[in-house]
Amino acid sequence: MAKKMKYDVKDLKLAELGKKRILWADGDMPVLAILRKQFEKDKPLKGMRMSACLHITAETANLARTLVAGGADLVLCASNPLSTQDDVAAALVKYFKIPVFAIKGEDRRTYYKHLTAAIDHKPNITMDDGADLVNELHTKRKKEAENIIASMEETTTGVIRLRAMEAKGILKFPVIAVNDADTKHLFDNRYGTGQSTIDGVIRATDMLLAGKDVVVAGYGWCGKGFAMRAAGMGAHVTVTEVDSIRALEATMDGYRVCTIEEAASYGDLFVTVTGNKHVLRPEHFRKMKDGAMVANSGHFDVEIDIPGLKKLAKSVRNVRPFVDEFTLKNGKRIRLLGQGRLINLAAAEGHPACVMDMSFSTQALTSAFAVKNKGKLEIKVHDVPASIDKKVAELKLKSMDIKIDKLTAVQKRYLAESGEGT
């Protein structure tokens, strides 16, 4: 008799709508579709138990389908309490028979209960978006960490945490920084975050960006993408940074660069994309104009000092879905979007499928690489092999019917030799 599948989703009645969304996204993920056929044939993940802590979206569903096609015994849980698409979670359970533990809006206790369920699966491979799963394996579930071949990390915040663990000498198994692959951060972080953050802000607020003062805290790839899109919609963009090189780059890209303290007095919308803690603090809230909006598009809800904002407020009320208005003791109102969580997933649908096609194709191929190299990878944070980046880029170009030049024999010889000069 077959073992009954365990799962925890909001409502299986949502599954039909979720299936439609998954298949719609699949139509814009041609590279992953090619890999799914290849995985189905080759079974590179056969015999592997996988637990993935990711945003449960339609795009993630197609990655999950690919991993299962490759032979993986997969369980999914959410990597953020507000990023789950409940209909997609239901469809994965009902139609694709993949156990999912994720409910949009789940409280902290439920979130960690779902992480526990993923670890109870006794995985050999993990996937993370923020390193919460890996952190649990290094703190509360150390015994299960002994079974891990490798883990894949999808986001900047997670890579930061993992590199800190490596530096302290406490990392227990190899991790591959998928976020740092060119086919991930150059496109997903820049174009995906840029567009989806704008989408989340507009859905939450219905604000017109043209003519507004938009302050972007952080000018990494996510900050660059959001600044570019906001400027393209007519906003006056200010960038704040702690890194002198990035600040110089933002200046030469045409943005105003100053401190958060200075920008606090005139910004209409503040968006944090730093991967750090308490970027916007009480001293900044006090300076903000009446009606200023603050949002975060970094992974965790710590970039905005929400406890500090609550202490300043004499009242808090919800004024729209995903908009909480804090009235300060001086009468000014500060509007917090999406509870300070990823605004692009809290209030919108996350990155478009087209860009996630590359990120998740890189994830799938990196998982197969980890299995193929079982026991050979040093315990540290590894880069994605260049061959995987190249393969994903080539397949993406092919799917877009774009052809590029090839080096001639003369050009190859010239690059390989050092004798020819002036």
Image: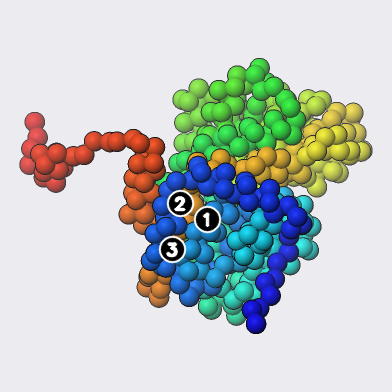
Q: Which mark is residue 40?
A: 3
Dots 1 and 2: beta carbons under 8 Å?
yes
- Is residue 7 positioned above or below 301 on the image? below
Residue 228: image location, x then y, percent: 53, 28
164 relative to 332 in the view: left or right: left
Q: Residues within 10 Å of mark 1 (few under 14, many from 20)?
A: many
- Is residue 177 positioned above or below 247 on the image? below
**Where does label 1 land, which residue?**
63
Residue 9: image location, x then y, percent: 73, 60
Which picture quadrant has residue 206? top right
Foreground disc of the pair 3, 1: 3
Residue type at tag 2: Leu
Distance from disc 1 to disc 2, alpha carbons, whole Å, reads: 7 Å
Front-most of residues 362 and 148:
362
* Label 1: which secondary element: helix
Q: Residue placed at 71% from the left, 44% from the top?
A: 346
Q: Residues within 10 Å of mark 2 (few under 14, many from 20)?
A: many
**Where does label 2 land, which residue?**
32
72 relative to 388 in the view: left or right: right
Residue type at tag 1: Leu
Q: Residue placed at 65% from the left, 42% from the top?
A: 349
Of label 3 and label 1, which has the lower sequence position?
3
40 relative to 394 in the view: left or right: right
Q: Can residue 183 be spotted in the picture?
A: yes
